[in-house]
Image (spheres, helix red, strand yellow):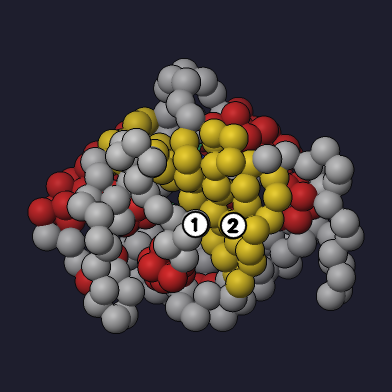
Amino acid sequence: MDDIEPPADLPQHFARPANEQEAAWSELWDQGRTPWDRGIPSPALVDLLAARNDLFNPVNSDGSRKKAFVPGCGSGYDPVLLALHGYDAYGLDVSEKAIATAKQYAESQLRTPSEGNFPLSGQKPSVSPGKVEFICGDFFSKDWGEHKFDLIYDYTFLCAILPAKRRDWTKRMSELLKPGGLLVCLEFPLWRDPRDPGPPWGLRGVYWELLARGGDGSPREYGDEEPPPAENAEFKRLLRVKPERSHKIGRGMDMISVWQKV
Ligand SMILES: C[S@@+](CC[C@H](N)C(=O)[O-])C[C@H]1O[C@@H](n2cnc3c(N)ncnc32)[C@H](O)[C@@H]1O
């Protein structure tokens, strides 16, 4: 499915206290209501992995594989994509139904990957696929174990959580990344007014505030010039580009950014 309009009744479904948000996601999964599901891996991530071997070598110098993580992975498209590009990949979702769906998807894709996992040139990674593992748990809790990853990918996870949890999102990302590890954000939705209720919560002006300025993620409109990063920022932005391909729902405004944990 590739609509460009998120369902108007989602914000109403999530108009509940902070401690009931995860249950609200599971309810939707259990009802088979997953209007965010695009059915394919992120084209923008596919292209970035292929274009930037310098940043995305999935193998360590000792030959072991790097570990990649996708929180709020839903049906598992992006963890599977990362595994097909050589990482040992982990997907986390709070919904058991999502995890069951993702496991099924991974089984078929690791056997017969669809073309959507690779760039339009058809070029395949030179490294053999890694493994993929799915975990049911709450991103904000440590109940699902102590993990450290080399790469984390966020697509439609930050926009799915309450704005009041954004600082916790940054803290958790920092805890879960190894020093020098990369956080890749497909910035979405940038077209949506950040004052409108979500999900999806509009994220224009949010990433820089959170990751470079160490703020609470209240959106700031800077015009062309971003203010300098905070001296004690935990993340350094390595790049931010407009991807040539992204999901239609991004309305041509998605950006993809890569942040390094310092
Ligand atoms: C908007 S959906 C996006 C799913 C997936 N990234 C995709 O693009 O299809 C957000 C996902 O995050 C999951 N989720 C929400 N809060 C979570 C939390 N605290 N911990 C783990 N997963 C969560 C939901 O169950 C849902 O599958």
Which label sits in the foreground, 1 or 2? Answer: 1
Assign the C terminus to one quadrant of the image.
Answer: top right
Task: Give the secondary structure at mark 2.
Answer: strand
Pick whichever, 101 or 115, lies toward us: 115
Other-residue count near label 2 (Cα within 10 Å), few / some / many at <14 / 14–19 / ≥20 = many
The mark found on residue 55 in the picture is 1
Is residue 11 in view?
no
Q: Is residue 106 visible?
A: yes
- Residue plotted at (57% across, 65% down): 256
In the image shown, does 151 or 116 lie closer to the viewer? Answer: 151
The circle drawn on residue 227 is: none
Q: Earlier in the sequence, mark 1 or mark 2?
A: 1
Spot occupied by residue 179 in the image (x, y as percentages of width and height): 59, 35
Amino acid under disc 1? Leu
Give neighbour class at mark 1: few <14, some 14-19, many 20+ (Cα, 10 Å).
few
Q: Quadrant of the N terminus?
A: bottom left
Residue matched to label 2: 258
Q: Nearer the viewer, residue 166 or 153?
A: 153
Q: Position of residue 12 (x, y in %)?
A: 60, 51
Q: Position of residue 195 (x, y in %)?
A: 77, 60
What is the three-letter code of the residue carrying label 2?
Val
Does 41 sit above or below residue 179? below
Q: Residue at x 59, y 75 (%)?
A: 242
Based on the displayed image, in which of its 4 quarters is residue 49 positioned? bottom left
Residue name at image x 22 percent, y 50 percent: 129
Residue at the left extreme of this rendering: 111
Q: Are marks 1 and 2 in contact (CB under 8 Å)?
A: yes
**Is residue 44 shown above or below 181?**
below
